[in-house]
Amino acid sequence: MELPPPPYSAAPQNESYRFSPRAVALKSARPRTAPEFNGQRHADPRSSLLNLDQNFHRFPRSFGFYYAINSTADIVIALHANDRHSLFYISSHLSSNSQPSLVLHSSPHASSSPLATANINFVSDTVAIKLYDSPTSVIKAQSAKTSYAQMTFIAQLPGCDSMEQFAWKDIYRRERILSDKKMNGMKLINCETGEIVATWTKPKFSHRKLGKMNFMSRERSKLGERFELMAVLTLLSILEREREEVRGNTF
């Protein structure tokens, strides 16, 4: 029986990456209740596209992953392919030994401070993840590929000491026939309850779009932001592993 990856733990932040004061201020200032309508139009074209979840969560309920413009390695998170206002930037450093394999930045710009990083070990199929939880600490986590899942990880739910294990699993052909024939990708399940908390859908054919992620749980706040960061980072690690396998087969 394979053991799940160890849970994450807090540690002093001594990394070269740090939150900028502005990023921290923005994080603490995020509204916890829906803003009142004052009749004014917002200049940001994304405002009409983001659903109510964006007022309470860092990520929208549904979003896409796309290759950054003029890049075949870096990725952006956006609402749709033609969105001129991306949400987040993910830089890839697989060829560098001095930087993390993946860096999820706190804005659409590669120069911004990180929300999280992932170091991928392709030999052991494990990923060392760091969540930049505050200006003074970093949360260390680990995930691993197992015989029954593409990736597993453990997350602590907010407001309690309980730890939940989650696993990214392939959506098989039989499941697509019974549910949605168009769904070709993976599902993220709670290993204890069996609930599908997120899905990943691959496009049929696209040079730029890698796929679409959906948070399925109706009570996202009970899972918390750390869970969502872990879900995104582990998914990105799976995609990076698949890209590395393709590159390896071409030589």
Image (cartoon, rainbow, N blue to C red):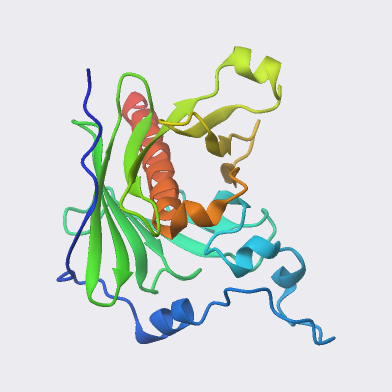
Residue 174 horizontal side relative to residue 143, left or right: right
Q: Which residue in the rendered view is the most extreme toward the right?
A: 39
Q: Identify the residue at image location x=39%, y=60%.
A: 159
Check the image and report above or below for 81 versus 212.
below
**Looking at the picture, how far across and down is residue 135, in whole percent?**
28, 77
Quadrant the N terminus occupies: top left
Q: Identify the residue at image location x=66%, y=30%.
A: 204
**Looking at the picture, how far across and down is residue 82, in whole percent?**
70, 58
Q: Identify the residue at image location x=14%, y=71%.
A: 14
Check the image and report above or below for 13 versus 176.
below
Residue 62 horizontal side relative to residue 12, left or right: right
Answer with the quarter of the image where residue 37 lies: bottom right
Along the viewing direction, whichever of 15 and 132 lies nearer the viewer: 132
Answer with the quarter of the image where residue 247 lies: top left
Check the image and report above or below for 38 versus 157.
below
Along the viewing direction, whichever of 157 and 130 lies nearer the viewer: 157
Answer with the quarter of the image where residue 120 lies: top left
Q: Evaluate whether residue 203 shows in this view.
A: yes
Q: Identify the residue at image location x=32%, y=67%.
A: 133
Q: Which residue in the rendered view is the most extreme toward the front?
A: 160
**Looking at the picture, how far across and down is residue 239, in whole percent?**
43, 38
